[in-house]
Image: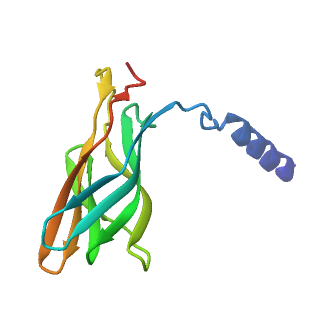
Amino acid sequence: MKKLAILLICVVAMISCSKEDATTKEVTCQKSTESYNNNNGAILTLTSQEWHLKENEIGGIDVGVNIRGTIQGDSAKIRIYGDDVIGDAKIELNDKSEFSQDFGIFFTSSPSSEEFIAANTIIMVFSGQDTLKANISSCSLENIQH
């Protein structure tokens, strides 16, 4: 009887759990190659930028970017934002100073009423004591909540 009760509880728990909606809408846009340098040897080349916007689990929006490219320098970071919190995430480089990585750039915890959203951030390339700061911006992303 005890085993039957446990089995029944497990079945009810499995049925009552909701699956994540597989039809989550996402809007994307792509930008072409962009290069940045500071005349001190630090160089950033973005060969691909795919920006994406989607609704998050708390009713707001997430905006991110998948970037590919190369640097001439020692290391690189990208600035990320979220509900008034600012941080820098390390860009992982291979032995040829190439990268291909996806980053969440910013999120909101409440719906946005703007029809289109444009995001921007900073990529920093560090070369010795020198820092290259490249301001990158998304194309206009249609707000799926509008």
Q: Position of residue 10 (x, y in %)?
A: 75, 46
At a point 70% along the width and 41% down the height, the residue shown is 13
Quarter of the image where one finds residue 96: bottom left
Quarter of the image where one finds residue 72: bottom left
Q: Position of residue 68 (x, y in %)?
A: 42, 58
Q: Is residue 55 above or below residue 135?
A: above
| Left or right placement of residue 136 versus residue 70 in this view | left
Q: Position of residue 107 (x, y in %)?
A: 33, 41
Q: Position of residue 52 (x, y in %)?
A: 42, 40
Q: Is residue 71 above or below residue 66?
A: below
Number of disc labels: 0
Q: Nearer the viewer, residue 7 or 86?
A: 86
At a point 40% along the width and 22% down the height, the residue shown is 145
Q: Is residue 66 above or below residue 146?
A: below
Q: Nearer the viewer, residue 50 or 117?
A: 50
Q: Nearer the viewer, residue 94 or 53?
A: 94
At a point 42% along the width and 66% down the height, the residue shown is 99
Colour setup of the view: rainbow
Q: Quadrant of the C terminus?
A: top left
At a point 17% along the width and 65% down the height, the residue shown is 132
Q: Is residue 41 above or below residue 37?
A: below
